[in-house]
Structure formats: C-alpha cells, structure tokens
Image (spheres, grey):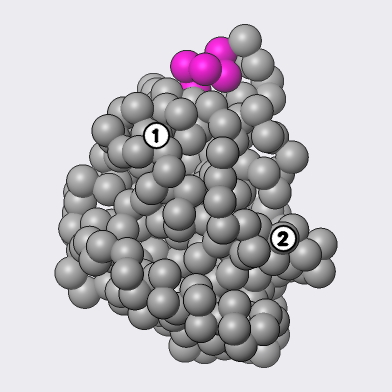
Amino acid sequence: MKLDRVIAVRNTKTVYRDGDRCIKVFNEGFSKSDVLNEALNQARVETTGLNIPKVLEVTLVEGKWAIVSEYIAGKTLARMMQEEPERKQEFMELFVDLQLQMHSKTCPLLNKLKDKMNRKISEADISATTRYDLHTRLEAMPRHNKLCHGDFNPSNIIITEDGTPYILDWSHATQGNASADAARTYLLFWLDGDIEGAHEYLRLFCEKSNTAKQYVQKWMPIVAASQSVKGNEKEREFLLSWVDVVDFE
C-alpha cells in the first residue's frame, strides 16, 4: 500500500490514492467505532444501487485506522462550479436532482436521523431551556425513513470523465426526513460563504420536491444545534447563531 500521493487533507484524516484505490487514513486516536461505523454506513448504502465508491477493506496503517475504497477519477462538482461559473445553474440543478434521487432510496439498517439529532442537541453548548425547546420541536417533526447524507455538498460529488456522478463520504448517513438533510445542505452553502448559492439551492430543492420552503426552514435551528457539537470555533459560532432563529421571512 503506497501512501505517497495525497489527494485531500482534513482536520481528522488524510486521503491518499494508490492506483485504483482510495485510502482514507484517520489521525491517531480517532475513534475506532466511528471509523467502523463509517465503513458500515458506506457498505449499507452500496445496496441501494446509488453510484458510490465501494468499500474494499478496513485496516490499520502504521497504527492508524484506515478505510480503503474504490478510487473514482473525476472532478468534484464544487471545482466544476468554480471553473465554469457560467454553468453554475446547470450544475446546481444536477446537484439537487442527485439529492432527490438519494432521498428516493431507503436503507433500513442505518441509524435514525432523529435519534442522532436528539443526542447531539443534548451535547450542544446551549441553555437547558433552548435544548428543551429544540428537543420538543424535533419530536413534533414528521418521522420519515428516507436515505439522508448529512453532509451533502458539491465537494462530495465527483463527476467522472463520461459524466457519471458519484456521491462520496457517507460518515454522517442516516435514515430520516429529507427536509432535515436539505436544511443541512443549505447551512453548508452559508458556511462556505455562498449565500446566493444557498438561496438558489433551497428554491430548487423546494420546487423539485414540492416541499414548502417554510417546512425546510423549520428544521434549520434543530439542524444547526445538532451540527454545532463538532467543528471549529468559527463554524460553531455561526451555527449557534441560527439556533435562536424562530421565525423566518
């Protein structure tokens, strides 16, 4: 296994390419259970028939946990949006269509989205009163069992040379309400500084899925609180600023 070609570096992991294999090596001390859960999520999502890299093995590399999967050659949708800004609308349409295709699938063995969010809200650095309010709001939201990605953004979509799209990074996958997944994607555009893209994404998602914008917006404080537990200080501060937003225009 050659680890001399780095293709991505993140806070908790480094991703390498070795021929037709992609090796995601997690930092020393990274939770063993989280690594195994990510590999299991990915293996379970493979059964839906979506285009995703197949897991090949989970192993140790110099004492660090690693997930080995298929290497998918191509460009990320995020890079394509940057390189061809005149085609951004076309790319955004494709992005939303892919998410809706994913939401049309079910994966019964995945963890429940509501359970994960309840746990994260309990861990969030917010007042007990706000936590209670968010738990109550979350409990009142409809229960669905759609396949949700949890980190669906243009950087996690690879387009191959022949135009085939692949969805990457299933570490946050759950089954639950598609509008919660959409709320997360909307907030990710904001975190990336693309406010215009956030609004256009939400418009397209609601139009194509026949979902009321207000319904997706109801999820945003809940999603922001649950996502605030991890991440850097700046990201946490931004997400927590959404938690107290009760009414939307």
**Between 157 and 207, the one nearer to me in the picture:** 207
Dominant secondary structure (helix, strand or loop) of the stretch shown in magenta: helix
Q: Which mark is residue 241?
A: 2
| Picture quadrant where residue 155 is located | top right
* Image vertical order of residue 110 relative to residue 129, above or below: above
The amino acid sitting under disc 2 is Ser
Q: How many marks?
A: 2
Q: Residue furthest top?
A: 86
Q: Is residue 90 magenta?
A: yes
* Image vertical order of residue 173 relative to residue 126, above or below: above
Residue at x 68% of width, y 20% of height: 83
The x, y position of residue 77, in whole percent, is 54, 32
Classify mark 1: helix, strand or loop.
helix
- Which range of residues does the magenta coloring cover? 87-91
Closest to the camera, between mark 2 and mark 1, is 2
**Position of residue 234 in the picture relative to residue 26 (left or right):** right
The x, y position of residue 240, in whole percent, is 69, 66
Whether residue 184 is visible to the viewer of this picture, yes or no, is no
According to the picture, the residue beneath numbered tag 1 turns out to be 205
